[in-house]
Amino acid sequence: MDYIPKAEWQWVFDQQQGKLSVVDRERTFPIVYESNMLRLRESQVLSFTVDDVTRYIELFESESLSHFEESLRCKIILHLIAIDLFHKPMMPKSWLFQTSEHQQIQYNNGELAILTTSGVPESAKYMVLEQQDNFCLCMLFDECHTFSNGKIFKQFQIIKVTADKLTPCLESQPQEWISFQNAG
C-alpha cells in the first residue's frame, strides 16, 4: 500500500463526533486527539497543504523513522503534523508518573523512553517529541497506557512531563531526527 500523500488527502474535522482524520479516496486515517484538545471548533475540511506534504515526506524518509513499518510510520507522522497544526498547548502532568530511578538530563527528539504511572505502577513506551528546559513532550508509542484512576491513553496520545519521570529505553535508536514542527 502506498503511504505517500496524494493531492486528494484532506484533514477532516467532524465537530458532532469530535473526530479529526486524514481522508483520501480509498481510506481514512483517524487521529486520536479529542476535540477538547484541538483548536478546531466547527466541522471543516482542510486540504493537505504543500507544507504538510513536505514535512510528511521529510519525516517519512528520515533515518529516525526508517526502521518502522510504512503503515506505522504514516500514522506517527500524521499525528505529529496534527499536533503542530491543531493541538492546543499543554501543561505538564508529571504527577501522573513516578520519578525514574535511572534519570537522564537530556533526551534527543525521537528517542524512546518509559513512563511509569503513580499509584498502581504500569509502564509504557513513549517517544520524546521535544525537550524544552526540563520538560519533555512525549507521544505514547505502545498501544495503550492505563492509569490507576481508570483513564486509558490510546497510542499516539501526547503528554508533557518533567524529564525526571522518563526512564531511558535500552533499545538502540537512530539519533538523527527532523523536528515535526514548522521551522517558521
Image (cartoon, rainbow, N blue to C red):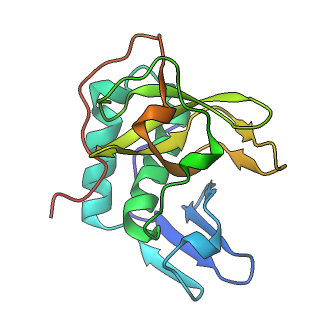
Q: Residue at x 38, y 27 (%)?
A: 111
The quarter of the rendered structure image containing the N terminus is top right
The x, y position of residue 166, in whole percent, is 48, 30
Figure check: 5 above or below 169: below
Give the image quarter of residue 99: top right
Total count of labels: 0
The x, y position of residue 170, in whole percent, is 47, 10
The x, y position of residue 176, in whole percent, is 23, 26
Q: Residue at x 63, y 56 (%)?
A: 32
Give the image quarter of residue 121: top right
The quarter of the rendered structure image containing the C terminus is bottom left
Residue extending farthest to the right is 150
Q: Residue at x 36, y 32 (%)?
A: 110
Figure check: 29 above or below 77: below
Which residue is nearer to you in this view: 174 or 59? 174
Which residue is nearer to you in this view: 170 or 59? 170
Q: Residue at x 53, y 44 (%)?
A: 75
